[in-house]
Amino acid sequence: MPIKQDIVSEIIEKVDIVEVINEYTHLTQKGKNYMGLCPFHREKTPSFSVSREKQLYHCFGCGASGNIITFIEKIENVDFHGAVELLAERAGIDIQEKDKLFSREKEKLYIINSAAGRYFYKNLYANEGKVAYAYLRNRGLDDDDIKRFGLGYSLPQWDGLLKHLRSEGFSNEDIEKAGLAIRGSKGYYDRFRGRVIFPIFNEYGRVVGFGGRVLDDSKPKYLNSPETLIYSKSRILYGLNTAKKSKEQFLIIVEGYMDCIALQKYGFLNTVASLGTSLTIQQARLLKRYTNDVCICYDSDLAGQEATLRGLKILDRLSMRVKIISLPEGKDPDEFLKINGSEGFYKLIESAVYYKEYLIRSLAKNYNVDDIEQKSRFVNEALKIIVDSNDAVEVENYISIISSLARISINAVRTQYNKYVNRDLEVFNSKMYINGNNRYNRYMNVNFQKDIDKISNAYINAEKIIVFNIINNKKLTPELYKKINPEMFEDKIIMKIYMIICELYKNKKDINEKDILSGLTGDEANYFMNLMKGEYPIDIDIEKFIEDFLTYKKMKVLEKALQESKMKDDNKTVMELQKQLIKCRLSLAERSNTYVRK
């Protein structure tokens, strides 16, 4: 069983790194730090440094570095769990007892949710639930479906659930912790009122939360449980408790409750819902535990298409094989099934395309290939999609598709592809912000090799500077927290580091290297230590730096949209995009030479 992060942090807090390491190699104080012979390699001159203030160690000889946990892992040849247990014993912390307290708290929430689920289900068949029952029947669900998914109804009164749960012995405080009650100025009241209820099960089939849908035009249309000790929306996939039992070798991802329920009702048990239009990296990792093959089937509207593209990027980051099921325009899976049934949906699955083909075909819709200039632009944009592929067979397949869509020979596309991957490209200068006085972006030429990372070193460098400064400043302001989405980071380890920073911020804890390291694995910890040793600028205004970084990214998106609008002869949109680009450039100019703090 994984050891809770809070317990790990407490252990690190109570153990003195200098005292522990001194038992393995003699340490002598040198200024703020302590020096000694490295226990991991032979040396005559001490190069092993330990910081009591930062609770970190680093060897300037062999490069070994980390916190007290990574030290014990290496010196005692144990895994993370073993190292924590050894240190916990030293600190006098009973991990099992701590875990028991945590587990008891979680178990209580599971029991409350289970009781609430039974209450909602009974309401559906009472006189007060007739309107909700009729709604579900009109959506094509029968009693077996309702029972299988545990659907229910929350009464419109303010304290119906509260009264029921209190009668079963639960306190107002516990009901609030489960996310089922809200504390107002006049006392507690039910979170869900007058809604069709969808219990949300975790992958093990336990109720962790609820979703509620209104039966009229009131807002919000859908209401979900808040984050609790047992429920985190970004880490749950609706329907996974059933889908994981499917004999199929792939999973289908849809947006909402009814889409998932409809597909499972029609026999597609391998269906899960992301509950919204934003698949998260945590949900993607959960998917990967059960399969490496995924089909995205979001709604065919603009929001659904945009969600598909976001999901593709996340799943691709985890090297998963992704196909896209394309629904007829204006339809969602539930609507499609009612008209076409299982057979129709099977045909959609058979015609699903891999994500790069989907991107290429989506791109083709924006170009008139009868026009030579637009044909050329389409080919070049399409080649950007496949240029990072190292699979020759895959490349040939996509070249054939591009050739067909552009209505030109395969040889012509292949020739252009070979030119494209070998030409010099202008990339954002990797030293763009090292010198605070150098405001405008310089450019440099690099040879674009097929086997190099598609992410430019410049972006990674900028991302490191952002995280480096946040950690050095030991704070994340509310403005930066709202502004920086973890998924903006293309470096996976930087993203993880920033997510740990966000957790510390949300829990109102100081941002420090010790807590960050406790959430990283061995390789990630070494990466982090090297980051913190890097010679990055710390005399910059980080908020303005981030503003410019995001503005530059936005300009790239605007420039692409501008080219597409020009090809469509959409003059109104062209003018609007040009205005936005000018506004971006002006904002960059206004912030000129303002990174260095005065």
Image (spheres, grey):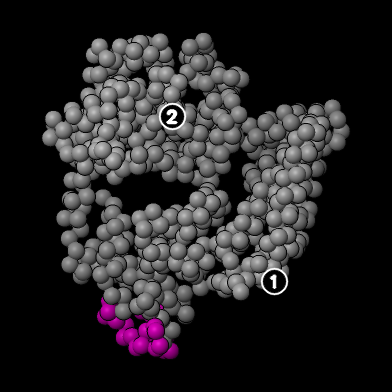
Q: Tell me: residue 543, above or below residue 34.
A: above
Name the disc covering residue 437, or none. 1
Q: Residue drawn 76% across and 55% down?
A: 425
Q: Residue drawn 52% across and 16% down?
A: 336
- Locate residue 356: give its quadrant: top right
Q: Tell me: residue 156, above or below residue 317.
A: above
Q: Amino acid at mark 1?
A: Asn
Name the disc covering residue 220, or none. 2
Crowd around label 1: few <14 · some 14–19 · many ≥20 (10 Å): few
- Residue 404: % across, % down: 76, 28
Q: Residue drawn 20% across and 35% down?
A: 111
Which contiguous range is marked in magenta? 19-45
Location of the C terminus (image quadrant): bottom right
User: Marks 2 and 1, how far apart in space?
Assistant: 49 Å
- Residue 409: % across, % down: 82, 32
Please tell me which of labels 2 and 1 falls first in the chain.
Answer: 2
- Locate residue 524: give its quadrant: bottom left
Q: Is residue 520 left or right of residue 110?
A: right
Number of marks: 2
Q: Disc 1 on helix, strand or loop?
A: loop
Q: Nearer the viewer, mark 2 or mark 1?
A: 2
Q: Is residue 63 left or right of residue 331?
A: left
255 in the magenta segment: no
Q: Residue drawn 44% across and 33% down?
A: 274
44 in the magenta segment: yes
